[in-house]
Each structure stands twice: as C-alpha cells, then as structure tokens.
C-alpha cells in the first residue's frame, strides 16, 4: 500500500476540487448513483434480524454513511437508495442524517419496496422507472471506500465516446495480494484482462478451485499481451452505463452482478458488450460482506487507512460524536471515563459517555456509546456496540456484541462469538469459539427460510412461539437470555454453510490442498466410484444392450462408439463413469451369456478382441487408464472365483494396447485401498505379470516423468 | 571461467530448403559473412575465449576455409556430429557432456542479434537461476519474399509465455497447439505470483543459460532430445512442483518413480548460497510473507528484448530481412578493398560488394548484397537482391528483389523479378527479355523451365 501521506493529500484535494471539475462539464448530466441498501442474503443473521445491515455501526458510524460519504466526495449529485429489508429504519436514519438536509450536495432519494429479491430486481426497477439518465455508479450500502473514481469515470466516458456503447461497465478493483488481511476469501476472483484496453476477458470466482481454466477464445482478441490477475480485491463499486439497467430487464434471470458479468462475457461476441476494469493501488475500497471483513475494515478504519474517513472526522456531522485522536490510534469521544490502571494499548475507539472500570486492558477494539464496562476486563479485537453492559473479569477476543447486550461477571468469549441484540450472558461461563447467541430462536428463522432468500423474511410474528422456549442455562449462563444459533458447524452442504456462516471463511486456508504435482493428470486423485444413480443404472443397461446388439448385428465399432456417446449425453454421464461402466459391461458380458462356469481361456477369447477399438476410443488420458483399471479391479473383487482369468484379461488388454504398462504399474502400486484389494494384488499370476512388466520396462530404459 | 559457450550449428535449415540445398545453413552468407559468424562475433565481443561448436562434417570443412571464420580469435572447439543421426539439440548437449565443466550458454547458429548479452547472464547470476533465456518481440517481415505470392500469413501457432509482474520470471510456457482445451494454470502459482502477464507476440531467440546440473540431468534422462521442445517446457513446469515431502508414502513413491530427476537438479544448490538466502532480508516478491522464491529451487528467467535487432534466420523471409538489417550492425566499408568496381557504376551506399568482385560499366546496384568472386557485366541493374558468391551476371540483366545462390550464371538480358535462383544454375541467355515472375528457380524445376524457355524461342 502507498504511504499514508500521499493518500491524504490526494483525497483531501479530491474533496474540494471535484465539485469544481463537475461544474466545468456543463453539458454533463449530474452524476448519479444507485445505492443498494440491502445485501439480499442472510450472512449477518441473526444480527440483521433487528437492524438492517446498512445500519450496523462500524467505528460507531452506520455503514451506509460511509457509502454515502464516498459517493458525495466523488461528486455524485443524486443518489437513489434502494431499501427492502427494514426499509423504514433505513429511511428514518437517512432522514435524520446530513444527507437529507437541504444543504447536502448530494440529493438522496429513498425508494423502498418489499418486492426486491436481488440486485437484479433493483436494477430492473431502475430501468422501469427510468431513473438514470447517463452513467451511474452502482454500489452497495456496506461499502467503505475512499477510492478516487474520477479517473475511472473519465476512462469509462472516454471508452464510451470512442466506440459507441460498447463498454457498459467499469468494475473498480483494489490491488491487494493474496493473503492480505482485507482480502475477502469469498470474493477471491481471477480476472483475465487485455493489458492494453483493460477489458475483462474472463472473470471467475476461484474459491475452492485448484486449477484455473481459461478458454482459448479470450486470447483471440488480437492483442498480444494479457494479464491474469489474482491480486485484485473487488470493491463492489462499479460504473455502469444506462444499458446495464436495460440489460437486466432484458435478461430477467440475472440476479447478481456476477450473473451479469458472466452473462456479458459469454455473450460478448453476440451482443458486443464489454466490461472493463479499473485498478487502484492506493485507494481503499472494501465491502463488508461478512464479520471477518467487518473485523478487518474496522481495524483499517481505526488505523486510518481510509483517510479522510477517520473516526475523529465526524463526517456524519452528528452532534456529540466528535472525538479526540491521540497516539497509538486511540480515539476517545466526549464523556469517556477510564478507571484507574486501565490501559488502552493501541487502535482503540471509544464512544461517548462510556465508562470503563479499573485495570482493564483494551486493544484493537471499538466500543460504542453509553457502554458500561467493569473492572479487570480484557478486550482484544472486540466490537462492542451501544448501550452494552459488561461486568468485571470478562475476557472478550475477536467478538461482536450488539446493542443492549449484557455480559455478566466472569464470562469469557472466545474468538468469533457474536452476541446479538439484548442478549444476556453469564455469569461465569465461557463461550466456545464461533458461538452466536440471539434473542430470536433459530427455528423460527428456519421456518421461513425456504420462502425467502432476502433479509426481509417476516419475523417477529412468532413471538408467541418464542416464549414457549426456554433459555438453556448451560449455554448462556444462569442469568443468561438468548438462544445459541450455531454450535460451531452445521453439517450442511458447503453452499448453505456459506450463506449461514456469519464470520465468513478464514483468511488463510491451510496452505493447501493446492497439491502441486505438476503432471497433467492428478495421480493421487482417488478413484471413487460415484454413487450409483438411476441414470447410471439405465445407462449401464443401455450400454450392455448396445454392445450385445453390436455383436449380433455385426455393427462396426465406430458406430458403437457413436451410440455410446449419444447415450452418454442423454443420461448425462461423465466420461469417467462411461469408462467404468464400459469396462464392467465387457467383463460381465461372458457371464450373462454363458453362465458363471467358464474356463479362464474361454472367458478371455469371448471378451476383448472385438471391442478393443471401442476401448481405445475412450481410454486415452492417464486418468482413463486408471479409471478403467479400477473398474476392472472392482469387478474382480466381486467375482473372486475368476481371479485366475484376471491376469489373462489384463495381459490381453495390454497386448491389445488398450492399457499401457506404466499405468498398470501405477495402478498396481498405489490402488490398494481395502484388504481385499491388497489380497487381490497378492495373486500369484498378477504378481508375475507385474514383474514381467517391470522387467520389460527396465530393459527398454523407459523412465518417463 | 564462469560460462562455457556452446554454439549449435548442425541445423539443416529445414524451413528454407531452397537456400540450404547446397550450402549448409550455418554457412549461408548474410552481408557476405557466413551466418554462424554472427553468434560467434556476439560471443567474442563480450569476451568469451573459447567456444564449443557443435556442427556437421560439412560445415566443419567449410569453416576451415572461410576467411571470416578464420578471423575469429576465440578458440573454436569444433565437435562434429553425424548429420543424418537425427540428433536433437539436447542430444547434442548430452554428446558433449564430458567437456562441460561449468554452467553453459547455449545459442543457435542462426541468431543475429545486438542484444546486450549481460542482460541475460545477469538474470542468471542474480537469481541463481536454473535457466535464463532470451526472447524478443516478433519481427514483422516487410520485404516481398521470392516465390510467394502476396503476403503469406504466418500459419505458425502462437507461443503463450507467462511472466510475473517484473517481466523476468518465467512462469508459464505453452504453444497454442497444446492448449485446445483452454489455458490452465494452477491456483497455487497464482497465489505465489498473483499478477501474471501472458504475452503472445514473442519469439524465442534460442539462447539459453543453463546450469551444469541441467546438462548432467540430460545425461541421466535420455528421453529428452530437444532443448526448446522438451527441456525448456519441462524446466518451466517443474518450477512449481512440490518439493520432496516424505510424509506421504504414496507421494514418496511417486517421487521415486517420476520425479527423481527433479531432485537431482535442485539438490545441487550450494549450501553457502542457501545460507546467504536465509540470513538476508531480501525477497523477490511482495505481498505474502513467505521466503524468497517461495522456497523453490528451480527458477527460470527470461529477458525480453523490446528494442534492437533479434532475429532467427530460419525462413527465407527472415533471411532476406536479415540481409537488409544485419550489415547496419557493423561499421565496415561496404565495398571490399579487393573489389574492382568501374567508375561509371551507380552504386547505392546501402549495398555491399564482396572481395574480388568485378563490376563493369553502366551498372546500377541498389540495396543489394553482392558476394565474393562475383562478376557483374555491363548494363546490369540489381535492386533489392542478394547475390551470393561466385555468381556471374551477363550484360543487360535486370534483377530485382531476388536471391541468387552461389555459382549461378545469369544469361544475357535476363529479367528476374522476385526470383530465387538455386545453387550453380544457369539462366539461359536470351535475346528477348525473360521475365520470370514469382518463380522458384531451383534445381528441381529448372530443367522444366529450360524446356519451357526453349519452346518459347
């Protein structure tokens, strides 16, 4: 990151100059922005059951205020705030704020509807109401940023002027290496851009991927230099042309911006719409998309990375919110009282009228207004909102405590705990890592879970039900009030867990899983036969039928392959399964024809020679060989009586050049997973065969990679 | 001696057989100097005293008589290999392995460049690299090529070269032909080098610095036969393969079976260097906090020239282009002192006349190269052409944009435009002007042409 000094001067000048620059372009329409004050997900549940995400305090200021300040300082003159979940609260907040004063340079219109379910709905509404007249900025209500987007805006307009209406969107990214604290693991993207034009050619979320694939057509644009960037952090700020709203209307299946980007890139050749990037190196722009991000953005804010948006700046212009700034980034609002022997180590922000007892140790924490904190309290990375009571001898590490919660004596909160509104904990209890406590019962949420994907599920009606349920003193303490929401982990599928998990993914997942074997085939990919689905069974039967018919009617192998391929598509069978099924069908075939008593030699002659070309068509890559061999193994594990024939079959397959010796050796050396398969490998014939192969290999001095 | 230089001069010039039919590629005259003189000169200029030249018997013989090569002051250790032995460049290296005592600098005889060689070698030194190579922006050929109607689209597949942010570390290399299913990069590489530049318009200059260990590795791994085709991609790929971890027995087995050679290369890092790296706070990357080079021992670097001349003479088009450009690299008198040039001859300053040439009256020579022992008779016009050694051009010929190989005889009044005349061929003297448009006149088709011409007269 650049030095703070440089940023300060830039941003400070930006604030004052930008308006002047705006006036000069008299022909230009006033810059508009669309602010989406809803996340359309439940990541912050249960906290957002009581307060919409945009109003959650970050450094004692509601998040939406940061976004509005950012927009205003970039020169936006008209902002449309779209609210859905708890719209009335947001509306009330905004009407009280400086944004709705007549002196505000940025006119804020609040548009509320219960019907918005996604960003797509919002933008379709923008189009329907034809709110935007020219390029506009699209941003979420939980973005904290000081990026100077005037340059990006200029580039965007220039591009639009140069070739009419081709570039529809400029996405703003911040440079940030992988592993950086403020990087959101869920937003981990890989972007391929054309170095010269900065046009996005490929955009992909990389979470959970090992290999990144780039289709070749993106390299055919005539450019000679491309950049593949993994060091970008999506700021969730984008400059959009009016067409964006139209495109959302045209494509009613676009829900999120990712859908939009993906759709545009895929259809680029047809529609000719392009998306560009603007990468900023020294600005700050992050979306608070989970609590981990909340943690890192809060610390960045306190450490003044978001200058000029600092806690003491009181940019929201609220009375009584000014605070003093002293060294080690300690901020104290008015009326703070600090007991004897209490230490504020560093990066601490304390709201007004908060009193702290004696011998406390506070570091890297934010404490809201009107809190009362007892003696001997240890706070580290604690985010304590307003009106919270914390008794003595409490230890809180990396946790969030919402308004009016109460922590009784002797409580320990381990990492990543969340106490939602009005919860009471303790006394003398220790909450394990990742505990979430709320006054809302988790079940009440689950019930309306299915119907709505948005924040705005109608809750609160079931208070009668809630009352019947009792608080569990073992969980929340003897005097505790609240329900445990998430006991560490849910056994859900990954997708669901992601949407449930408040804290988000851990920043540095174990150095991985990025198994680095360089060979193109992944040798330690376990060969797991996929669970037999109905389709697979049907496919099995069909293949058997096809082969049988082929034999009876003497159909050529080419045609058989064709038929199997079309079956493969009809039943949506993966190539691997095709391999396995084909192998099994061929191996089982003799039994079905002749009954189970066959001599090994008969078995072999019946088998392969005829279908060798079919096999050859499918067994090509190394993985195919292994798949084929594993199916082969599976078959013989079931038919123990035919082990004698096994070697012959293997030999046959080798001689027909269906299988390569290297692969057979590999299968032999590594494939043993169960006792029985180990036993199978001890089979004398097989051992001999392998030995023979090994010798052959040595003599040919073949030592591939 | 830090580096041993190895010059690969055994190539047959398979992509320009018309020129190399009688003259081996290494001896093709470029600006009246044999092609291989250029890389030798490059080496001599930077102070090499000894060069191992791998070549064929034929070239070796030609070298011993060539005046220019005799001028080379370096000690040439000529190793000849069998011409038809189908030996690749890596095979050749393997062949001379006993001579290799230190790290090596391998270059090809068809490279003409004015690169500051230290750029490549410095990369090699600074990063203790396993390999450092030279690339340059692809050259656009502007001249019309004889025998080709119009501009031929280069059908060759593009190379995709991935380098890191600094543009030096080589991360990825593949040919378009191998990327049918799309370009695939492991995420772990992107984590280490989050900003990768993929460049396509580059040509490999075939100049490599290689660690001695790589040569030793070659002797043990006989399946690799070409440096460019196999060894380099292998090294680039291996940079990011997992280093030995014996914890997983299955993996260990794999290591044994497949990765033995890789161990060999990396294990020769000198312990002192390693110590230096541990004790220093220098790092090659920013962003994450891991050690320099992420602990990888195998490192490949590339120097990409963005200006200056760097050309490989492996096609006819490149040959013509280079004949135009190469002489500008050296400040030598364009007319050899032993040439006999008539006073009444129009000669452009951009032409080169070789030794013992006879240029008669009323000739005009523009933008052309005329080889040694060549006779140009009266009223001949030569523009934009390359005339090799020992050629006789009779009166009144008009030669334009053509290449005329050694010992050819051009009959009176011939009119050649964009032609290629093969070695030792005779173009019949004709009263009528013979106009041969866009034609190859090489050994193969000359007899037919002769018949054709006779029937015309």
Image: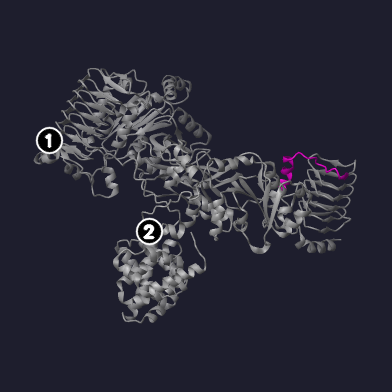
Tell which of B57 and A601 is nearer to you: B57
- From the viewer's perspective, is B280 left or right of A299? right
Q: Give the range drawn in magenta.
A: B320-340
Mark identifier at residue B250: 2
- Marks 1, 2 in one chain: no
Q: Nearer the viewer, mark 1 or mark 2?
A: 2
Quarter where residue A347 is shown: top left
Tell which of B370 and A450 is nearer to you: B370
Q: Is residue B328 magenta?
A: yes
Compared to residue A682, the image places residue A80 above or below, namely above
Residue B247 showing in the rendered view: yes
Question: In x, y percent, where is residue A622?
Answer: 44, 62
Question: In x, y percent, where is residue A459?
Answer: 18, 38
Quarter where residue B230 is shown: bottom right
Q: What element does badge 1 sit on?
A: loop
Query: The N terminus of chain A appears in which quarter of the rendering?
Result: top left
Residue at the image point whose x is 36% and y is 43% from the top? A254
Compared to residue A583, the image places residue B218 above or below, namely above
Mark identifier at residue A677: none
Question: In x, y percent, where is residue A76?
Answer: 39, 26
- From the viewer's perspective, is B162 left or right of A514? right
Label 1 belongs to which residue?
A: A480
């Amino acid at each position: 990151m650049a030095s703070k000094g440089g940023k300060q001067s830039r941003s400070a000048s930006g604030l004052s100059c930008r308006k002047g620059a705006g006036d000069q372009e008299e022909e230009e329409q006033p810059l508009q922005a669309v602010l989406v004050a809803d996340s359309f997900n439940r990541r912050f549940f249960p906290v957002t059951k009581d307060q919409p995400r945009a109003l959650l305090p970050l450094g004692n200021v509601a998040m939406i205020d940061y976004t509005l300040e950012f927009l205003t300082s970039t020169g936006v003159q008209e902002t449309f705030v779209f609210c859905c979940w708890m719209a009335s609260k947001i509306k009330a907040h905004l009407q009280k704020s400086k944004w709705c004063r007549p002196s505000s340079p940025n006119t804020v219109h609040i548009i509320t509807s219960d019907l918005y379910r996604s960003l797509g709905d919002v933008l379709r509404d923008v189009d329907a109401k034809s709110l935007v007249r020219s390029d506009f900025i699209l941003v979420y209500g939980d973005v904290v940023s000081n990026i100077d987007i005037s340059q990006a805006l200029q580039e965007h307009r220039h591009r639009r002027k140069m070739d009419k209406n081709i570039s529809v969107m400029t996405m703003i990214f911040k440079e940030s290496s992988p592993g950086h604290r403020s990087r959101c693991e869920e937003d981990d993207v890989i972007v391929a851009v054309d170095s010269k034009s900065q046009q996005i050619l490929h955009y992909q979320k990389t979470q959970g991927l090992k290999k990144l694939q780039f289709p070749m057509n993106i390299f055919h644009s005539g450019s000679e230099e491309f950049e593949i960037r993994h060091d970008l952090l999506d700021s969730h700020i984008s400059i959009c042309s009016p067409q964006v709203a139209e495109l959302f209307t045209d494509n009613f299946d676009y829900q999120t911006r990712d859908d939009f980007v993906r759709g545009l890139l895929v259809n680029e050749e047809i529609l000719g719409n392009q998306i560009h990037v603007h990468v900023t190196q020294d600005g700050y722009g992050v979306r608070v998309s989970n609590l981990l991000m909340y943690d890192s953005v809060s610390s960045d804010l306190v450490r003044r990375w978001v200058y000029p948006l600092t806690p003491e700046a009181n940019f929201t212009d609220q009375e009584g919110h000014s605070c003093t700034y002293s060294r080690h980034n300690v901020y104290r609002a008015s009326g703070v009282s600090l007991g004897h022997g209490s230490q504020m180590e560093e990066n601490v922000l304390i709201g007004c009228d908060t009193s702290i007892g004696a011998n406390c140790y506070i570091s890297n924490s934010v404490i809201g207004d009107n809190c009362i904190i007892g003696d001997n309290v240890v706070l580290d990375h604690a985010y304590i909102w307003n009106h919270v009571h914390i008794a003595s001898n409490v230890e809180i590490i990396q946790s969030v405590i919402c308004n009016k919660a109460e922590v009784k004596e002797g409580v320990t909160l381990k990492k990543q705990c969340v106490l939602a509104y009005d919860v009471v904990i303790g006394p003398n209890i220790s909450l394990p890592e990742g505990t979430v406590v709320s006054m809302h019962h988790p079940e009440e949420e689950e019930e309306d879970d299915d119907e709505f994907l948005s924040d705005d599920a109608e809750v609160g009606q079931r208070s009668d039900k809630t009352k019947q349920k009792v608080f569990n003193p073992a969980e929340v303490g003897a005097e505790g009030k609240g329900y445990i929401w998430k006991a560490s982990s849910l056994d859900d599928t990954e997708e669901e867990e992601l949407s449930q998990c408040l804290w988000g993914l851990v920043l540095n997942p174990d150095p991985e899983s990025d198994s680095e074997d360089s060979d193109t085939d992944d040798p330690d990919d376990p060969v797991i036969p996929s669970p037999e689905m109905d389709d697979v069974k049907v496919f099995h039967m069909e293949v058997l039928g096809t082969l049988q018919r082929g034999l009876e009617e003497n159909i050529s192998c080419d045609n058989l392959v064709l038929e199997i391929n079309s079956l493969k598509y009809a039943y949506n069978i993966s190539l691997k399964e095709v391999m396995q099924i084909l192998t099994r069908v061929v191996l089982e075939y003799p039994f079905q024809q002749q009954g189970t008593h066959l001599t090994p030699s008969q078995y072999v002659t019946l088998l392969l020679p005829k279908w060798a070309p079919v096999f050859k068509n499918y067994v090509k890559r190394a993985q195919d060989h292994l798949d084929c061999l594993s199916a082969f193994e599976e078959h013989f594990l079931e038919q123990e009586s035919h082990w004698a024939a096994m070697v012959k079959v293997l030999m046959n397959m080798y001689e027909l050049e269906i299988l390569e010796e290297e692969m057979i050796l590999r299968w032999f050396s590594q494939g043993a997973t169960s006792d029985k398969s180990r036993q199978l490998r001890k089979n004398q014939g097989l051992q001999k065969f392998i030995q023979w192969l090994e010798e052959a290999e040595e003599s040919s001095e073949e030592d591939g990679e | 001696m830090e580096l041993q230089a190895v010059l690969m001069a055994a190539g047959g010039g398979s992509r320009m057989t018309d020129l190399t039919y009688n003259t081996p590629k290494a001896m093709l005259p470029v600006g009246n100097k044999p092609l291989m003189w250029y890389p030798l000169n490059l080496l001599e200029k930077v102070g090499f005293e000894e060069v191992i030249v791998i070549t064929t018997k034929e070239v070796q013989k030609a070298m011993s008589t060539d005046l220019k090569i005799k001028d080379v002051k370096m000690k040439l250790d000529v190793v000849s290999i069998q011409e038809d032995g189908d030996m690749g460049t890596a095979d050749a290296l393997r062949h001379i392995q006993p001579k290799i005592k230190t790290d090596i600098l391998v270059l090809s005889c068809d490279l003409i460049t004015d690169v500051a060689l230290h750029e490549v070698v410095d990369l090699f030194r600074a990063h203790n690299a396993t390999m450092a190579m030279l690339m340059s922006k692809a050259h656009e050929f502007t001249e019309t090529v004889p025998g080709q109607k119009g501009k031929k689209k280069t059908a060759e597949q593009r190379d995709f070269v991935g380098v890191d942010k600094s543009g030096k570390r080589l991360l990825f290399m593949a040919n378009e032909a191998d990327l049918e299913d799309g370009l695939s990069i492991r995420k772990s590489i992107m984590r280490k080098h989050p900003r990768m530049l993929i460049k396509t318009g580059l040509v490999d200059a075939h100049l490599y610095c290689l660690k001695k260990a790589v040569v030793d590795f070659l002797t043990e791994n006989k399946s690799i036969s070409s440096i460019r085709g196999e060894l380099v991609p292998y090294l680039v790929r291996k940079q990011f393969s997992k280093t030995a971890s014996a914890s997983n027995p299955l993996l260990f087995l794999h290591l044994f079976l497949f990765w033995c050679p890789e161990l060999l290369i990396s294990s020769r890092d000198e312990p002192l260097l390693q110590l230096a790296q541990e004790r220093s706070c220098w790092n090659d990357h920013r962003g994450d906090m891991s050690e320099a080079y992420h602990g990888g021992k195998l490192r490949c670097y590339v120097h990409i020239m963005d200006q200056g001349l760097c050309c490989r003479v492996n096609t006819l088009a490149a040959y013509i282009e280079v004949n135009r450009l190469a002489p500008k690299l050296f400040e030598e008198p364009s007319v050899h002192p032993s040439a006999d040039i008539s006073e009444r001859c129009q000669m452009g300053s951009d032409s080169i006349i070789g030794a013992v040439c006879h240029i008669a009256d009323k000739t005009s020579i523009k933008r052309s190269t005329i080889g040694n022992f060549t006779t140009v008779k009266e009223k001949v016009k030569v523009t934009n052409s390359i005339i090799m050694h020992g050629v006789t051009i009779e009166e009144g010929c008009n030669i334009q944009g053509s290449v005329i190989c050694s010992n050819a005889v051009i009959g009176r009044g011939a009119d050649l435009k964009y032609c290629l005349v093969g070695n030792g061929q005779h173009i019949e003297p004709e009263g009528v002007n013979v106009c041969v448009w866009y034609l190859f006149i090489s050994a193969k088709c000359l007899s037919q042409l002769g018949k054709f011409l006779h029937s015309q007269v």
